[in-house]
Image: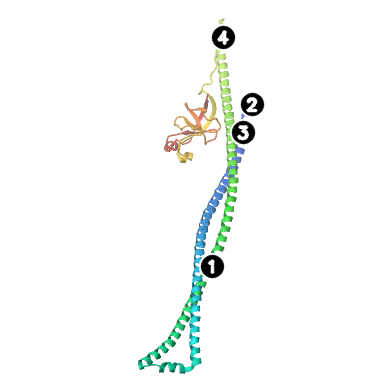
Amino acid sequence: MTLAMGLECFAQTTQEQIDSKKAEQRETKANYQTAQKALESLRSKKNDKEAYLTELNSQMEELKETLAKLERQYDEKQSELKLVQGELADAETLKAQQYEDMKLRIQYMYENGESGYIELLFSAKSLADFLNKADQISAIAEYDREMLDEYEKTVQTIEDKEIQVQEEEAAIAQLQNEYEEKEEEVALLVEDTYIQIREYESEIEDSKSEVSRLLGQISSQENELNALIKKQKDEQAAAALAKKRAEEEKARQTAAAQNAAAQNAPAKAASSSGMSAPPQSPDSGSSEGGSSGKYLGRFKLTAYCACVQCCGKANGITASGTKATQGRTVAMGGVPLGTKISINGTVYTVEDRGTVYGHVDIFKNSHEAAKSFGVHYADVYQVS
């Protein structure tokens, strides 16, 4: 009785440790989920910034191409302006020359008066010659006027063209300034975005370290939890075995008492009649029986298959590196991989993980078979 009470006390203490460890693990898993979400958020932000940087680089290339094109256009306009200015200078020279020629003729007319033209006309030898000279004088005057007008128009046209080219040149220069300012703006954005990406990369590395640390902590807590559950199962198995032995001892003692009473009754009768009872063979005792191997306890049984829904992957490779096989492979934590256990007379090998100690997941070839297996409980023995 004292042993049973002691074991019960130990079991309660172990259960408290299990509950405490489960609470720690729940908190760690919650922290892991938070850290994982933070990591995913950082990766998403980094990807967005990288996409933005690609867009900025594309804009920068377009700006460089546009600026190069504007530079060529500006150079062309400068060349065109020089050409127009040369044409304008030539036209101004011709205009000035024509103007000088007209001034000389006007000066001649002024200095000689009209008599010179009259003498020229009356020096004609015939009427036809007279008319011809008159036409020549008129043609010269008309020519002077037309040429002066033409030169003035030419000069005006070239001046207008010069103004147009200068305006176009100024417009190109303005565009160059605008695109150069835009290029500087984009360059600053590229630099800032690049810095942000580097910062995200640093934060991602820190976040990955935190996620890795929490995963390690979860794994460590899982091992500690499995050890506590195994300890509890061992305590329960020891208590059950002690109870069984106590019951067997009590039954043996009761049977011995009954045998003794049965033997004493004939002996008393024989004594009273002067006869002795025949000797009895000693009691050989009772055996434990049961399955062979170390009793681990009454475990929960479920089933799984190699699908994504059950395992998160579908390659059928176990944690031990073997290929999962129905009738052999089971998953359970708390014992070394390769441990053999007996369940209802069938020997399995622990080749996979995914459940805590005390919960055996039995491999099935199909998801339907695993799903229909349901939940059972059975005595489990460790086979040496």
**Image location (x, y in percent) of residue 25:** 59, 40
Foreground label between 3 and 4 = 3
Which quadrant is home to the N terminus?
A: top right
Vertical placement of residue 152 versus 166, above or below: below
The residues bearing labels 4 and 2 have C-alpha atoms spaced at a distance of: 39 Å
Which residue was labeled with disc 4? 267
**Image location (x, y in percent) of residue 176:** 54, 65
Instruction: From the viewer's side, name the closer residue of 307 and 24.
Output: 307
Q: Earlier in the sequence, mark 3 or mark 2?
A: 2
Vertical placement of residue 47 versus 155, above or below: above
Query: Could you tell me if residue 164 is visible in this image?
Result: no
Label 3 is placed on what type of residue? Answer: Thr
Vertical placement of residue 55 versus 30, above or below: below
Which residue was labeled with disc 1? 173
Packing grade of label 3 (10 A; few <14, some 14-19, many >=20) is some
Foreground label between 2 and 1 = 1
Packing grade of label 4 (10 A; few <14, some 14-19, many >=20) is some
Label 1 is placed on what type of residue? Answer: Ala
The residues bearing labels 4 and 1 have C-alpha atoms spaced at a distance of: 137 Å
Packing grade of label 2 (10 A; few <14, some 14-19, many >=20) is few
**Image location (x, y in percent) of residue 37:** 56, 48
Identify the residue at image location x=54%, y=53%. 49
Which residue was labeled with disc 2? 2
Which residue was labeled with disc 3? 14
The answer to the question of whether label 2 and label 1 lie on touching residues, with beta carbons closer than 8 A, is no
